[in-house]
Image (spheres, grey):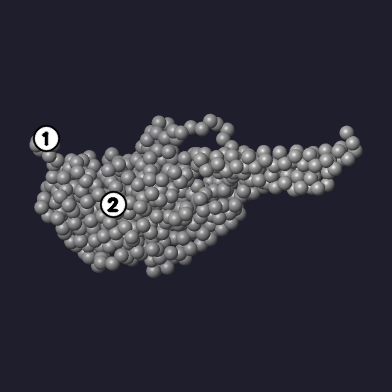
């Protein structure tokens, strides 16, 4: 070997080493965030007497700001809310950041008397699981959330590394071809160049088709390690993340009509008895609590999370009697569950009188009656004229019920949907004790109204940050039988998030006025329905009584 050739050999070895080095630099996980790795997280919380919608805006990089919007509704008192963020996950790797478990940033929000959005910004300094505490001075709601980062997948790393190496080798080939005495030497880096491009192209083809790893937060319990390196799986992939059912236990002192009181909801794992702390935000809440009162008044509330597996609900029940209660939840990997409290709630009388009877209570006593030949009915709720029409309601066939609220498209999406419909029944047609009867009713359902086109993207916004996009639709059909229909499509399509962006929140008043629901009643009988829409920051609850005819099967009335 000549000295010249030896020098070239050394130079090549050096450059190859450099390529490997640059390649490895290029494949380090990118700590930037992109829209696909997380959207806004919207969580409804009934904090004391205030029904709030908390929107945690997408975190676009760590360390960075977390913008928190607090949306208030009509009747919300003005006041101060204290916000505090705490990292909750520990890493097995050493970290230079302050230890988790202690708050790292605080902020305050001054709520005004006008309903709308009030904002604050807190800093988050690391990816992983976090908790946002919101305090009104008396109660603290603790909302878990995940700060994601964009991690490059192995095929993406192959693309970056391959093209980088190819670029360097191209340079080497040119240098060798022009400087070396024997031009054949240039074939060596050229061959490497072809190999590097092949690796990059293979990576590019694979990156589009390989499935995402299970997403921490949405499918796996989030830890700092699996959030920062989702592809570094120590364990083999599993496809079934399902969890045992949840037991709901209600605690709290005796409630008295007309007086405010709190109930505690205890969620325990049906298999181990341990607290359930893997509730996912679905339909913009951790728990949707439904309460049906003695005269047919519906409460749709969102208990605050006070500790793992523990939730608290502040109530002011207007009249004494029995209240039926159910909760809608989603456990990580478990799908939607409707948990009914076996006992319900009782509100005792206050001396010989009841508390002040609210407008909602008055409305509940005068439901719109449909079915049995009656196809339309109307009422006025909070100065909004409402007309409800229903096709012929028969058990076993889909029934479409359409509410028209006002006469212009000015409804706001509440909990990510244009409308909600709660169905309870069949109930006895006589008697006043609706709560008592609802307690024993076989059907409790929750149907949504949303555009068919909006449904495809709806999953994105109902999931927490970092949740897997392909998991959408999971709760779109709710209780299995409730589905949305697509009237007023042009207005409805706006609900679909575009390019991974988040869907419009409550501040967009552009939906309706027709809000259709389709539900298939499993059996005939008299049902209680409540349609809920939001207009002008007020949630309007329309009570209905619907007679559903029994189905005809083989000419025999069932
Ligand atoms: Cu809800």
Picture residue at 25% right of the left edge, 62% below the top: 405
Where does the image place residue 16, in percent across and percent down from the top left?
76, 40
> Is 496 or 262 nearer to us in this picture?
496
Where does the image place residue 135, in percent across and percent down from the top left?
46, 56
Whether residue 165 sits left or right of residue 148 in the image: it is right
Whether residue 21 sits left or right of residue 74 in the image: it is right
> Is 40 or 35 nearer to us in this picture?
35
- Residue 177 visible to an observer of this rendering: yes
In the displayed structure, 554 sits above or below 56; it is: above
Picture residue at 83% right of the left edge, 44% below the top: 180
Q: Quadrant of the C terminus?
A: top left
Picture residue at 22% right of the left edge, 53% below the top: 401
* Quarter of the view holding residue 505: bottom left
- Residue 420 visible to an observer of this rendering: no
Label 1 to label 2: alpha-carbon separation? 29 Å
- The image shows a total of numbered marks equal to 2
Label 2 lies in ligand 1 vicinity (Cβ under 8 Å): no
Q: In the rendered image, which residue does mark 1 sit on?
A: 554
Secondary structure type for disc 2: loop
> Is 121 or 258 nearer to us in this picture?
121
Q: Residues within 10 Å of mark 1 (few under 14, many from 20)?
A: few
In the displayed structure, 490 sits above or below 248; it is: below
Q: In the rendered image, which residue does mark 2 sit on?
A: 485
Picture residue at 28% right of the left edge, 67% below the top: 408
Q: Quadrant of the N terminus?
A: top right
């Amino acid at each position: 070997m000549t000295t010249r050739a030896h020098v070239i050999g050394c130079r090549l070895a050096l450059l190859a080493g450099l390529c490997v080095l640059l390649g490895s630099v290029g494949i380090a996980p990118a700590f930037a965030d992109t829209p696909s790795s997380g959207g806004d997280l919207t969580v409804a919380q009934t904090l004391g007497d205030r029904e709030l919608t908390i929107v945690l805006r997408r975190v676009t990089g760590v360390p960075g700001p977390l913008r928190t919007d607090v949306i208030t509704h009509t009747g919300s008192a003005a006041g101060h809310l204290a916000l505090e963020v705490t990292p909750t996950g520990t890493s097995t790797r050493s970290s230079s950041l302050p230890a988790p478990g202690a708050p790292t940033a605080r902020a305050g929000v001054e709520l005004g008397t006008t309903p709308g959005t009030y904002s604050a910004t807190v800093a988050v300094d690391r990816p992983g699981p976090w908790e946002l505490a919101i305090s009104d001075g008396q109660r603290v709601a603790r909302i878990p959330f995940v700060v994601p980062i964009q991690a490059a997948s192995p095929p993406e790393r192959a693309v970056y590394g391959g093209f980088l190496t190819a670029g360097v080798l191209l340079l080497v080939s040119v240098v060798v071809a022009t400087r070396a005495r024997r031009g054949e030497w240039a074939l060596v880096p050229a061959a490497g160049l072809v190999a590097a491009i092949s690796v990059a192209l293979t990576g590019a083809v694979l990156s589009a088709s390989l499935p995402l790893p299970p997403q921490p937060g949405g499918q796996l319990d989030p830890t700092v390690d699996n959030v920062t390196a989702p592809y570094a799986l120590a364990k083999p992939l599993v496809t079934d993340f399902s969890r045992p059912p949840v037991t709901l236990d209600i605690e709290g002192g005796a409630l008295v009509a007309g007086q405010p009181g709190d109930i505690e909801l205890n969620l325990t794992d049906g298999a181990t008895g341990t607290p359930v702390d893997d509730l996912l935000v679905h339909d913009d809440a951790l728990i949707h609590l439904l309460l049906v009162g003695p005269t047919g008044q519906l409460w749709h509330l969102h208990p605050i999370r006070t500790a793992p597996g523990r939730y608290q609900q502040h109530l002011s029940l207007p009249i004494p009697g029995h209240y039926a209660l159910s909760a809608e939840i989603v456990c990580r990997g478990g799908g939607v569950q409707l948990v009914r409290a076996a006992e319900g709630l009782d509100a005792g009388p206050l001396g010989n009188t009841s508390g002040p009877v609210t407008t909602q209570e008055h409305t509940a006593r005068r439901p719109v009656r449909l079915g049995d030949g009656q196809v339309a009915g109307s009422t006025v709720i909070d100065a909004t004229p409402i007309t409800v029409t229903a096709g012929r309601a028969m058990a076993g066939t889909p029934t479409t019920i359409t509410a028209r609220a006002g006469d212009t498209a000015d409804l706001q999406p509440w909990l990510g949907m244009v409308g909600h419909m709660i169905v309870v029944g069949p109930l006895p047609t006589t008697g006043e004790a609706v709560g008592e009867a609802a307690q024993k009713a076989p059907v409790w359902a929750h149907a949504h109204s949303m555009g068919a086109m909006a449904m495809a993207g709806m999953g994105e916004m109902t999931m927490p940050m970092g949740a897997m996009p392909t998991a959408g639709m999971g709760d779109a059909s709710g209780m299995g039988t409730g589905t949305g229909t697509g009237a007023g499509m042009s207005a409805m399509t706006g609900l679909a998030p575009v390019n991974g962006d988040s869907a419009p929140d409550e501040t967009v008043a552009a939906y309706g006025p027709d809000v259709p629901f389709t539900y298939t009643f499993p059996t005939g009988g008299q049902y209680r329905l409540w349609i809920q829409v939001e207009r002008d920051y007020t949630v309007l609850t329309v009570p209905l009584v619907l007679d559903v005819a029994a189905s005809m099967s083989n000419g025999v009335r069932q």
